[in-house]
Structure formats: C-alpha cells, structure tokens
C-alpha cells in the first residue's frame, strides 16, 4: 500500500533524525578514518618505492659484474697479445699487436669508469633504500597508533551505530527509491548534513531564508512535499513560537498622592 504524503514526511524526518545521530557518532572519530587511510596508502607507496629501488640496485650490481667480467677478458687478451708480440716476424705485426693492446687498455679504462659510475649510483640507491625504510617504519608506527585510537572509538560506538543503522533501514522502507535518492543527494551537498528541516521563526531551518506564510500553511497541512526555494531542503514542520503573556500593568500612584495632599 502506498504511503500518504504525511507518512512519507514522517519517515523522512525519522531518517534525518537517525542520520544526524549517526553523524554525531562519526564526528567523534574526527579525521582518524581518513588519516588511517592516508597512512595505509603512504605505506603502500613506500613499499613500492623500496621494491623499485631494490630492482634498480640489482640492475646496477649486474652492470658492475658485467664490466668486471669484461675487464678480466680484456686483461686475458692483453696477456695473450704480449706472448704473441714476442714471436712477431716483422714490425708491421708488432705495430698491429701494440695498437690492439692500446685499444684494449682504453676499453679497460672505459669499463673501470663505468664501474665507478655504477658504484656511485649503487651507493645513492642504497642510501635511498635505507632512508625510505626509516620513513616506512615511522609511518607504520603512526598507523599503529592511529588504528588503536580509531579501534577504541569504534568499539565504544559500534553498538549504538549498528542499532541506528537497523532503525534507518526500517525507516527507509517507507520511502520510494526516487525520494530517498533525492534526500541522499541533498545531504551530500549540505555542509551540516541536513536535508530535512523545520521552519523556525518564519525561516528555513537549513539556510535561514524566510519562508512565505502561504508555504508555511502548506507545510502544516502535510498534503504535499514542500522544499525550500533557496536551498532545496525538505520542509516538514513549522515550529510554533508561543507569545509570552504580557506582564500585568502597575497601577499609577500619582493620582492617589495628589488626592492625599488635598
């Protein structure tokens, strides 16, 4: 059976009341959930950076080993050429071997420079690994502290929160999907989380803009959903401000005093 407008308004007010209580509970957590998430993301970033640095280190070490191997090969070749040089038959062969030995000596110098460059890079990357590991440990300690604080707060409010969530689920069953979607959208765009408010002192309880008397009358009748023309919040009720009773007038004694003098 379709709910009447008054029932839908009542259900909206109930959902808003529950959501406000949930907001109050979650407000106690402050920025802890976001801080925990940020720390977890930062830790993953540091771990990824360390893995990348280790992979780069392995490549640098492989390069160093490769150049050292080349140097050994060059030196073996030079020893072989020195032996061959002793058995040359003419100056042309001697000069050719000498030239090749000089080229090999240059190759050795180039390889040695490459080793020095790679060793310098290796040193920098190892320092970065250690520095990143230190930062990682600091973040892990911060995360442990923040998680403990959050878990403590969550434990204190978990029962109440679960109870309210069940109440909310029950209350939203009286709302159609379109209305609930609109309600949630208004809440998301509201800084205070209020999508359903009352008219207080002739003004919207959300944006405090004046609500015309005729619209206030329509709100009281609850025959249709009325939204604020300025902020779009649903207006569900009009608070009646009771006028204070006038103070009794004090009787003037001026006339009585004048009669006494006569």
Image: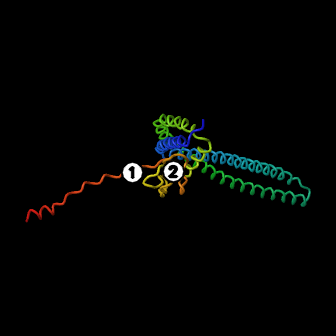
Q: Would residue 141 be seen by someone viewing this image from the given angle?
A: no
Tell me whether the residue at label 2 lies in contact with that at label 1, contact meaning CB atoms closer than 8 angstroms.
Answer: no
User: Considering only order in the chain, which callout, 1 or 2, is on the residue closer to the N terminus?
Assistant: 2
Expressed as whole percent of the image width and height from the top left, the position of residue 38 reads 56, 47
In this picture, residue 133 sits left or right of residue 243: right
Expressed as whole percent of the image width and height from the top left, the position of residue 115 reads 71, 53
In this picture, residue 169 sits left or right of residue 202: right
Which residue position is annotated with label 2?
A: 218
Q: Is residue 1 above or below residue 220?
A: above
Q: Is residue 96 above or below residue 136?
A: below
Q: Would residue 40 be seen by someone viewing this image from the given angle?
A: yes
**Looking at this view, is 123 or 129 the one in front?**
129
The quarter of the rendered structure image containing the N terminus is top right
The quarter of the rendered structure image containing the C terminus is bottom left
Q: Could you tell me how far apart the alpha carbons at marks 2 and 1 are, in whole angstroms?
A: 18 Å
Q: Residues within 10 Å of mark 1 (few under 14, many from 20)?
A: few
**Looking at this view, is 153 or 223 the one in front?**
223
Identity of the residue drawn at 55% across and 48% down = 225
Q: Is residue 186 above or below residue 91?
A: above
Which residue position is annotated with label 1?
A: 241
Identity of the residue drawn at 37% across and 50% down = 242
**Looking at this view, is 24 or 67 the one in front?**
24
- Label 2, secondary structure: give it: helix
Q: Which mark is residue 21?
A: none
- Label 1, secondary structure: give it: loop
Closer to us: mark 2 or mark 1?
Answer: 2
Q: Residues within 10 Å of mark 2 (few under 14, many from 20)?
A: some
In this picture, residue 74 sits left or right of residue 194: right
**Looking at this view, is 94 or 35 the one in front?**
35
Determine the residue located farthest toward the left in the rendered image: 262
């Amino acid at each position: 059976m379709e709910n009447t407008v008054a029932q839908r308004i009542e259900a909206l007010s109930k959902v808003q009341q529950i959501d406000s209580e949930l907001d109050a509970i979650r407000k106690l957590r402050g920025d802890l959930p976001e801080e925990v998430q940020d720390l977890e993301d930062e830790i993953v970033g540091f771990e990824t950076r360390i893995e990348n640095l280790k992979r780069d280190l392995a490549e640098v070490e492989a390069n160093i080993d490769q150049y050292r191997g080349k140097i050994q090969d060059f030196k073996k070749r030079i020893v072989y050429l020195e032996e061959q040089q002793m058995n040359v038959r003419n100056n042309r062969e001697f000069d050719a071997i000498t030239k090749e030995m000089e080229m090999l000596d240059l190759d050795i110098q180039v390889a040695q420079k490459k080793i020095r460059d790679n060793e310098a890079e290796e040193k920098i990357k190892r320092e970065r690994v250690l520095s990143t590991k230190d930062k990682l440990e600091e973040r892990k300690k911060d995360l442990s502290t923040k998680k403990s604080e959050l878990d403590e707060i969550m434990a204190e409010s978990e029962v109440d929160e679960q109870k309210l969530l069940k109440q909310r689920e029950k209350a939203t069953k009286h709302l159609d999907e379109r209305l609930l979607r609109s309600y949630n959208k208004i809440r998301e765009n509201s800084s205070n989380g209020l999508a359903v408010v009352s008219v207080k002192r002739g003004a919207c309880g959300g944006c405090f803009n004046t609500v015309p008397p005729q619209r206030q009358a329509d709100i009281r009748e609850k025959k249709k959903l009325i939204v604020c023309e300025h902020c779009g919040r649903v207006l569900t009720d009009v608070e009646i401000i009771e006028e204070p009773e006038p103070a009794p007038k004090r009787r003037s004694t001026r006339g009585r005093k004048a009669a006494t003098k006569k």
